[in-house]
Amino acid sequence: MYREWKVAGVPGGVLWRSVSGGGETRVLPDGCLDLLWSSRSGLLVAGPDRTAHLSRSAPGDRWIGLRLPPGTGPAVFGVPAEELRDRRVPLADLWGSAAAEVTERVEAALAAPGDGAAAVLAGVARDRLRAAGGPDPIGAHVAARLAAGATVAATAAEVGLGPRALHRRSRALFGYGPKTLARILRMRRALDLARAGAPLAEVAVRSGYADQAHLTREVRELAGVPPTRLLAPARSRAQAS
């Protein structure tokens, strides 16, 4: 069981909750960072993945999460995204005793019906964003242009940065350089087209791959399996422990 909804006050943020049926979930990279509560592990931060993360859970494991769009997580968590790359980190490792107060608020909300625990996560993120002066605006612009298929060179020119400066800024904002982010976002765009019913050969052309074989290689490298394996009913970024 999984559902998600948008959150006010955190641009591009998405709240979600899930109850696991058990087994393994393949979590695809997306350039995002998540603030998570797990019935098994407590409060965690899921960093940006370069390749698919395989999560294993027991039946009945519960998850509540706030997914932060590319470039927003560093302003919330107070560390560069590259320090969290390919990692699941207890929130206490980043915030110390402040994480205990958040845990208490989440657990109190869980004792009542409704989505109060998710609201706690959203409120914490809003407060942290406000204190940080908001996310770096370059992050949203770079991610949007790359998601739309712009080249790294064109994107760098638009934001007024040289290639090396954009690479450094991207590692801090997204956890990896702009070329890696572009590959990840292109894969996700291609999979969205395929799930909408477009044939893979057409998907490859529309997404900017040389051909279907190129699409298949890229998806296999990033997701660990070919696109045909991913076109079964989608599993979300939930259970990202």
Image: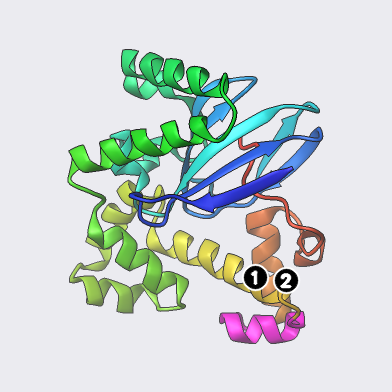
User: Would you name the residue on which mark 1 appears?
Assistant: 192
- Is residue 108 on the magenta stretch? no
Q: Which residue is mark 2?
A: 195
Query: Measured along the vertical axis of the image, is residue 185 above or below residue 203?
Result: above
Quarter of the image with the N terminus in it: top right
Magenta stretch holds residue 205: yes
Q: What stretch of residues is rendered in magenta?
A: 198-210
Secondary structure mostly seen in magenta is helix
Residue depicted at 19% across the width and 37% down the height: 131
Amino acid identity at mark 2: Arg
Identify the residue at horizontal 33%, vertical 12% (top origin): 97
Q: Position of residue 122 (x, y in %)?
A: 41, 39
Q: Secondary structure at mark 1?
A: helix
**The C terminus, quarter of image:** top right
Residue 234: percent from left, percent from top? 74, 57
Look at the picture and state if 131 lies above or below 184: above
- Quick check: marks 2 and 1 in contact, CB under 8 Å? yes
Q: Is residue 115 left or right of residue 119?
A: right
Residue furthest front as drawn: 113
| 235 sits left or right of 232 in the view | left
* 111 shown above or below 71: above
* Observer able to see residue 9: yes
- Nearest to the observer: residue 240 or residue 100: 100
Callout 2: SS: helix
Give amino acid for label 1: Asp
